Amino acid sequence: MTIHKEGFASIGLAGAFVLITNWLLRYFIGEIEWLTTTWLVVSLVFFFIIVQFFRKPTRITPIHPNHVIAPCDGKVVVIEEVVETEYFKGPRRQVSIFMSPINVHINWNPIAGVVNYFKYHPGKYLVAWHPKSSTENERTTTVIKAPNGVEVLFRQIAGALAKRIVWYVKEGQQVSQGSEMGFIKFGSRVDIYLPLDADIKVNLEEKTTGGITVLAHLK
């Protein structure tokens, strides 16, 4: 287990906050022992929460050309047929995964292929489970075309706490299944749009492991 590069600045700021606030309390009201001790404990818990958020586990993706793997850790909150209006402009099978603040927040490419489409959308910060978060929140849209011609679209969606979406892909790029696609800071959601004949392999409320869990089998 290591720390993801996206966390270096946040962890540094959190560490400085803990050191400075504890020094100030000790300097100005050090005689109130219970208060300084309580704040020390609270601030250290806060620091370790920030550190665990940016953990980077070692994972080996089971490569399969017909599998769509989970692009993130979290819980499946939506499985339904919808009309995707940005790229496909037609019916698709949507699978949505909610990422809580305690999940690993790295995003992985669900299939191998070429990035046919990518777009960043500025937007709101509704809670990630809000129905309109997929279309109104800050988000990215990525479409990967597999070697057999099948296309899979997925969106990184910011939540009420997520204030920064990071991505490592661009149009025309060749990506491998299970490689890092990006990172979302502090609570969010990822939507995946699949062909209607895709065989869904997960259920509602099921927990997913990014880069490992098989979401669907493509026909």
Image (tube, rainbow, N blue to C red):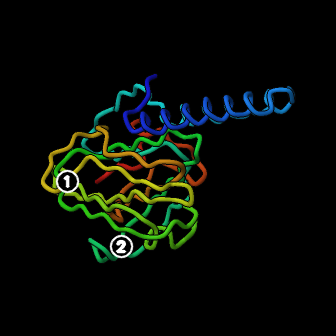
> Mark 2 is on which residue type?
Glu
Counting from the top left corner in percent of width and height, residue 131 is at 54, 71
The amino acid beneath tag 1 is Lys
Say if 196 sits above or below 1 in the image. below
Task: Please report the residue visible at 15 percent of the width from the left and 49 percent of the height from the top.
Answer: 173
Front one among 83 and 189: 189
- Total number of numbered labels? 2
Above/below status of 18 relative to 155 = above
Residue at the farthest left position: 172
Q: Residue furthest top?
A: 1
Residue 212 spot, x, y in % from top left: 41, 36
The answer to which image quadrant residue 2 occupies is: top left
Q: Which residue is mark 2?
A: 84
The residue under the point 48% across, 58% down is: 96
Q: In this picture, is 177 found above or below 15?
A: below
Q: Residue at x 54, y 53 (%)?
A: 98
Report the residue marked by disc 1: 170
Residue 41 seen: no
Where does residue 22 sit, x and y in percent of width and height? 68, 30
